[in-house]
Image (spheres, coloured by chain):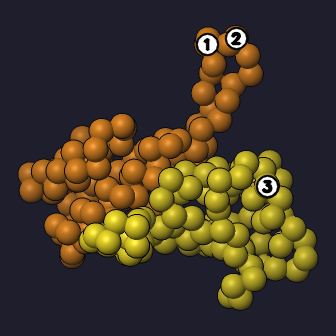
Chain colours: A yellow, B orange
Amino acid sequence: MAEDNAVLIGKKPVMNYVLACISLFHNGATQVSVKARGRAISRAIDVVEVTKRRFMPDLKIQNIGISTEELTAFEEGGAPSNVSTIEITLEK
Amino acid sequence: MAEDNAVLIGKKPVMNYVLACISLFHNGATQVSVKARGRAISRAIDVVEVTKRRFMPDLKIQNIGISTEELTAFEEGGAPSNVSTIEITLEK
């Protein structure tokens, strides 16, 4: 899957990301990957649920993967800290 | 799977829930279900990742399911609001 078809979830309102997903599908994508780290993970689930329930009921959740990324803490000069990540692959 | 083998994620530190999962497995469970709603969802992923990486590397993620629950807002007397949920099934 091309990285172009990924929606990275940040701190904007859920509906912004929902529209991003819908646009990708409307522009021909058959798979869209919703990715988030840390606290944005709950928002990623909201985005997927709203996209599916309100706008594209035939959408399938093809895969949900979770993982851990090691972050190097530049500011503290200390030990690296870990952050959880999620990647939800949606399929039309 | 018995409901006894579920760990419901709330606002306590991640390690509390990690220990709850490990205890269930040590007491004979072969499957443990980690459940969370709303903002606790990111913590649920942390719990699974820490349990798996630091303590039980052979653990398998058998399934990750997401859904939406409708909450009736008693206080406001208004429209019901929705909350996203996650359920991660771990298998020894």
Q: Is residue B3 visible?
A: no
| Mark 3 residue type | Asn
Image quadrant where one finds the C terminus of chain A: bottom right
Label 1 crowd (10 A; few <14 / some 14-19 / many >=20)? few
- In this rendering, the count of numbered labels is 3
Q: CA distance from mark 3 to mark 1?
A: 29 Å
Q: Is residue A37 visible?
A: yes
Q: Position of residue A28 (x, y in %)?
A: 88, 80
Is residue A59 left or right of A87 when viewed as pictured?
right
Q: Which residue is mark 2?
A: B77
Label 3 crowd (10 A; few <14 / some 14-19 / many >=20)? few
As helix, strand or loop, the secondary structure at mark 2 comes to: loop
As helix, strand or loop, the secondary structure at mark 1 comes to: loop
Task: Tell us which disc is closer to us: 3 or 2.
Answer: 3
Tell me, for residue A16, which label it has, or none.
3
Please state the chain letter of the residue tagged with numbered disc 3 in the rendered image: A
Residue extending farthest to the bottom is: A2
Label 2 crowd (10 A; few <14 / some 14-19 / many >=20)? few
Q: Which residue is mark 1?
A: B74
As helix, strand or loop, the secondary structure at mark 3 comes to: helix
Q: Residue at x 61, y 52 (%)?
A: A43
